[in-house]
Amino acid sequence: MSLTYHHVTIPFEYVDEALVLCKKLQERGVTFDTGFDSKGLHWELDWSIQGHMSAQDILLELEDYQINYSVALIRDRNLGDGE
């Protein structure tokens, strides 16, 4: 099964604001996978999203909070369906 998902990178200059937003989303029942690497904080807006928001809704929240980010659409990620 192929999948397209949003891989969001938030530069280190905006990590504090992004963590505050992430906490607010969690309080509203929205969770997803996150992580860090040498480029900053990553939000994986894929099958891991739990709650009432879509990836687009979460990206709009980043914009509302004026948090700089870049997003890459990742295609053909295998969900472990045995292929």
Image (cartoon, rainbow, N blue to C red):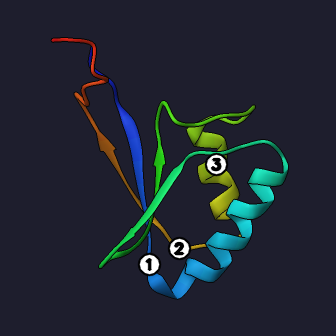
6 lies above or below 2:
below
Residue type at mark 3 is Ile
Apparent side of residue 31 relative to residue 36 in the rendered image (left or right): right
Residue type at mark 1 is Pro
Mark nearer the N terminus (2 vs 3): 3
Q: Is residue 66 visible?
A: no
Residue, disc 2: 68
Q: Are marks 3 and 1 in contact (CB under 8 Å)?
A: no
Apparent side of residue 56 relative to residue 43 in the rendered image (left or right): right
Residue, disc 1: 11
Apparent side of residue 18 relative to residue 81 in the rendered image (left or right): right
Q: CA distance from mark 3 to mark 1?
A: 17 Å
In the rendered image, residue 8, in percent from the top left (x then y), is placed at 43, 57
Residue shown at 63% from the left, 71% from the top: 18
Q: Is residue 63 visible?
A: yes
Image-quadrant location for residue 73: top left
Which residue is at the far right?
28
Residue shown at 58% from the left, 37% from the top: 49
For label 2, the crowd category at 10 Å Cα-Cα, with few meaning under 14, some 14 to 19 and many 20 or more, is some
Point out the frontmost of discs 1 and 2: 1
Residue shown at 70% from the left, 36% from the top: 53
For numbered disc 3, what is the local secondary structure?
A: helix
Residue, disc 3: 58
Q: CA distance from mark 1 to mark 2?
A: 7 Å
Mark nearer the N terminus (1 vs 2): 1
